Amino acid sequence: MTRRAGVARQNTLMLWAAFVLAIVLAEAPVAQAEEAPLHIAAAADLMPVLPSLARRFTRKTGISVRISWGASGEEAQAIRHGAPYDLFMAADRSFPERLAKKGYLQKASLKVYAKGILVLWVSKKTLDRAHALPGTGVLSSAYVHRIALANPRLAPYGRAAVTCLRSRGLLAPLHKKIVYGNSLAQAAQYLRTGAAQSGFLSESQAMTLGRLVAGDFVALSPHCSPWLPQEMGIVAASKNKKSAKAFEDYLLRKKAQGYLKKHGYQG
């Protein structure tokens, strides 16, 4: 091989190496984007069920999931202010539909994933003292000093609780007993610590609370308050829409729906 041919071959190899490196560098951001976790803004009533469903989804798809918790109203406000969420899972339909109307969620992606059940939870100690079963009638008992509710302006379950109390003519007589949490999780915390003797929760939250604190609950939906259709939607500004759509599809499948039903939701 002549010196000139050797130099030409070396130059060709260097150009080829540069070409391959350029492809690798060009594809690196794409691979990184595909590996980015799916970020879900979730209503606090889902705390007992969503982490397990997310882990199952990750095992099935390889897509990791990050969850931010809060009242639906708080999460909706965060989305309006540009929070980097991919999927919004609310405790009702009103918050997602308002966001979709303003262009913050993809309207075509809105789907009801479950129907929530409002319940009244009462501590066992209170029921024993009042010689009563759980129900709205026990709330007037002298043994009930505090009634925990989620903030009705931010949390659909809090709004449903107010509707229930008003329909029974109890909202005004009991207003001095009511303590509000920013979210359903905070209302449950009041009950867990004994700061409140009774409170309104989702059935899923009440089932979890019952494993930590002695008490009982009664379902109020659909009689005192309607079931809560809970809707999800993909954030319009998300860069991870494919993963968000995959999670929506996963959640609507029979197995995931069965899990939700087993843990306090209607399908």
Image (spheres, rainbow, N blue to C red):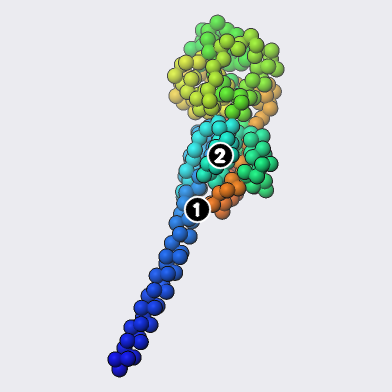
Image position, residue 35 (x, y; %): 46, 54
Query: In the rendered view, would you say 190 is above or below 20?
Result: above
Can the viewer see residue 219 in this picture? Answer: no
Quarter of the rendering occupied by the C terminus: top right
Please tell me whether mark 2 sits on a helix, a strand or a loop: loop
Most foreground residue, 85 or 259:
85
Q: Residue at x 54, y 10 (%)?
A: 144
Q: Is residue 164 visible?
A: yes
Give the Cα separation between the discs numbered 2 and 1: 30 Å
Tag 1: amino acid: Thr
Residue 147 occupies quadrant? top right
Q: Is residue 150 above or below residue 85?
A: above
Percent across and percent down for residue 92 are 64, 34
173 or 143, which lies in front? 173
User: Which quadrant: the N terminus?
Assistant: bottom left
Name the kind of residue labelled 2 in the image.
His
**In this rendering, is residue 71 above or below 15?**
above
Residue lying at the far bottom of the rendered structure? 2
Name the disc covering residue 149, or none: none
Q: Residue at x 57, y 51 (%)?
A: 241
Q: Nearer the viewer, mark 2 or mark 1?
A: 2
Estimate the x, y position of residue 217 in percent, counting from the top left.
56, 21
> Which element is circle 1 on?
helix
Identify the mark at residue 61; answer none if there is no mark: 1
Where is residue 71 shown, x and y percent of the image?
55, 31
In the image, what residue occupies the spot 52% across and 32% down?
A: 70
Q: Which mark is residue 81?
A: 2
- Between residues 116 and 170, which one lies in front from this camera angle? 170
The local crowd at label 1, few if under 14, some if 14 to 19, many if 20 or more residues have their Cα within 10 Å, is few
Query: Which residue appears at 32% of the width and 91% of the height?
Result: 4
Lower position in the chain sequence, tag 2 or tag 1: 1
